[in-house]
Amino acid sequence: MGLFEIVPWNFFSILSSRNREIYYDALMTLHDMFTYELNIRVEEYISALISILEDRVFEMEDEEDAQESGNTPSSRARMILNRLLKTGWVDKEFMDASFIEIITPRSYAIPILKTLSELGDYSIKEYNSLVFSTFSALRQAMSDGGDHMYEALLSARGNTEQLQYSLRSLYHGIREFLRGIVEQHDVNLLLQDHFSAYKTLADRVYHPIKTMDSVHRYMGPIQNLLSDILASEELLQSMQTRAMGVRNYDDEEQAMDEIVIAIDFVMEFYRSVGSLVSEIDRKHSNYTKSSIEKIQYIMTADRSIKGNLTELLKAYASAQSREKEQVALIMEKHIRTNRQEFFDSASLYHRSMRSRNEDRPPLSVAPYEGMNPAAERLLREHIQNGYPQARIKAYVDSLLAGRDEIASPDIMIENDTEFILLILAVVRQSERGMAHVVDYFDGQVKRNGYTMPNMLIRRKVARHHVE
């Protein structure tokens, strides 16, 4: 069913009108009265609207408003109530067995009023009790023999859904603060956001997660309780019977499916909640770092005449054509400038110094006297340790791969390591323990950017067999 099959077509029109702020306050007043009173009397609501309209300008949006409304706050308050009636937010009726008029919010308007109230509420929502409530309900139901385990499971799922929603809202709330860092350029407002609004969020939500929050404390016991439920056929059967009695299921199989789905949902959340908390932790660290860096940047920015001129020129360079004209007019009006006619040592730019190339004899190179014997020995040991004989033999075996010989055109070299091993296989073929020989031919072969001699690598056994 579509949205406007449920709500009237002009339902949201009051929130896009000229007087949307007054209508919003009127809806919040209606929500508060709905929260604390069972029957909302028309006269009490009109009195509340009159208080809202004091010292506020209510603009007429059309001729109908002008005809309905008078000049008194009472008439304007009744006009607001009539607009709520026409747009489908409320109904007006008489209280039972009396002539007292009351207003009742429409059923579809009640959750929207709650949503609007939450959007305007900047207080931090605490959720520490959700995990403990889930654990307590499951453990108590288990201790009582499982008679009310179905209700405990429904409560656990509801708490888990709310906790998941709260943690994700916290994550995206930190993203809002990060976005504010990019858009904010006033150091005082940045400090206010960091040490007031975000500090409240961190102290009441983030730090409890990392220190004393019940998420990490009870996530293991909750999963153990749910595993015990799944392992008990008797308990599942009891929950199925209870579900059929309190809810309208088509058959027992559908009831059991709902029970298993609810258990899996709660268990899956507590299995993955650690990664969600880690993401929140990384986002918190990112915000803290970005906030401090932005504050330091603004506080250390050059506020001298030179720095201000630099900012003006940057604004001029990044502005559009029309904005450039405005910036140029402002600079021409408030800044005295003159044309630079010549360059000297005090100018903005310095003349580049050219160097002259002179013909000079090349520097002499000292003759090579050879490497220190000890250093040469250490170098050889290092090379041998990096490419021992066993590694070279293994490489040759991989080249031959069950064959007795292989020619250069058939050797594929993928990287420098294989090229070094090929060189060492050729150089060290005569060493004791080597099982191959190399025959050379004229020319060279290039493979994958590497150049090698035109040669044939053969097993010694195959060579002796030929002889």
Image (cartoon, rainbow, N blue to C red):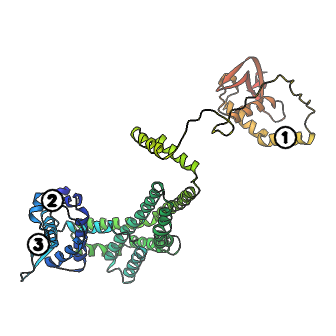
| Dot 3 or dot 1, earlier in sequence | 3
Residue at 46%, 45% in the rendered image: 333
Above/below status of 174 relative to 217: above
**In front here: 395 or 321?**
321
Identified by mark 1, the residue type is Leu
Residue at the image position 66 percent from the left and 22 percent from the top: 409
Name the amino acid, label 2.
Answer: Pro
User: Would you call the spot at circle 1 few (<14 residues within 10 Å), some (14-19), or many (20 or more)?
Assistant: few
For marks 3 and 1, give the one nearer the viewer: 3
Number of other residues with Cα within 10 Å of mark 3, as a class: few under 14, some 14 to 19, many 20 or more: some
Mark 2 vs mark 1: which is more N-terminal? 2
Percent x, y of residue 421: 74, 34
Question: Mark 2 — residue?
Answer: 8
- Residue 380 picture quarter: top right
| Residue contact at pointers 2 and 1, CB within 8 angstroms | no
Residue 183 place in picture, x, y as percent: 45, 54
Q: Position of residue 155 (x, y in %)?
A: 33, 74
Task: Please identify the quarter of the rendering in which residue 373 is found.
Answer: top right
Q: Is residue 202 above or below residue 449?
A: below
State whether residue 386 is above or below residue 156.
Answer: above
Q: Which residue is mark 1?
A: 379
Tell me which amino acid carries mark 3: Lys
